[in-house]
């Protein structure tokens, strides 16, 4: 069973998803994301900590959201990817397309991508 909870934090809308995101549940995720992009939400942060499985339809939903937001310079950021979900992003090389963070706080910080954070932490 899929559960989606949205909340506001400053200019960001945080979407917390729990359950499997697949062919049957991804339309619910799409409805929420596209609803926010239609309102031109400046920043959408997707919490994937409670998602254990995501298939290609779930990935396609997030890609569509990213494309819609790029039309008005909005940002879609992800955080909390578990090992299985992260592997899907890495295999499809979408980890290079999406801004992916380890935590909500990191995702909400302005101007730094996860790669920049890693480099500055190591630097």
Image (spheres, rainbow, N blue to C red):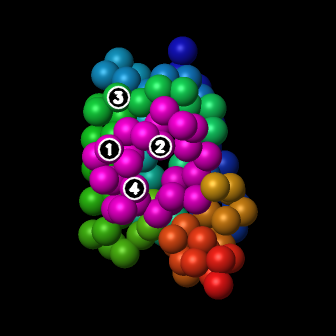
Magenta segment boundaries in residue numbering: 77-101
x and y, in percent, of residue 4 in the image: 57, 33
Q: Residue at x 64, y 55 (%)?
A: 102
Return the disc, 2 or 4, that comes first in the chain's sequence: 2
Q: Residue at x 29, y 33 (%)?
A: 56
Q: Residue at x 60, y 71 (%)?
A: 118
Return the disc, 3 or 4, that comes first in the chain's sequence: 3
Return the disc, 2 or 1, that comes first in the chain's sequence: 2
x and y, in percent, of residue 81 in the image: 55, 43
- The residue under label 1 is 91
Question: Does 77 sit left or right of 92 as displayed?
Answer: right
Asked whether disc 3 touches disc 2, contact meaning CB atoms under 8 Å apart, the reply is no
- The residue under label 3 is 55
Badge 4 crowding class, 10 Å Cα cut-off, few under 14, some 14 to 19, many 20 or more, is some
Kind of element beneath mark 1: helix
Q: Nearer the viewer, mark 3 or mark 2?
A: 2
């Amino acid at each position: 069973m899929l559960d989606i909870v949205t909340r506001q934090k400053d200019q960001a809308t945080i979407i917390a998803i729990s359950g499997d995101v697949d062919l049957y549940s991804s339309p619910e995720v799409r409805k929420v994301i596209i609803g926010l992009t239609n309102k031109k939400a400046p920043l959408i942060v997707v919490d994937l900590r409670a998602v254990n499985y995501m298939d290609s339809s779930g990935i396609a939903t997030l890609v569509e959201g990213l494309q819609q937001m790029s039309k008005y310079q909005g940002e879609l950021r992800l955080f909390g990817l578990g090992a299985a979900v992260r592997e899907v992003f890495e295999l499809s090389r979408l980890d290079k397309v999406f801004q992916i963070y380890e935590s909500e706080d990191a995702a909400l910080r302005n101007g730094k991508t996860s790669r920049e954070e890693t480099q500055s932490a190591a630097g």
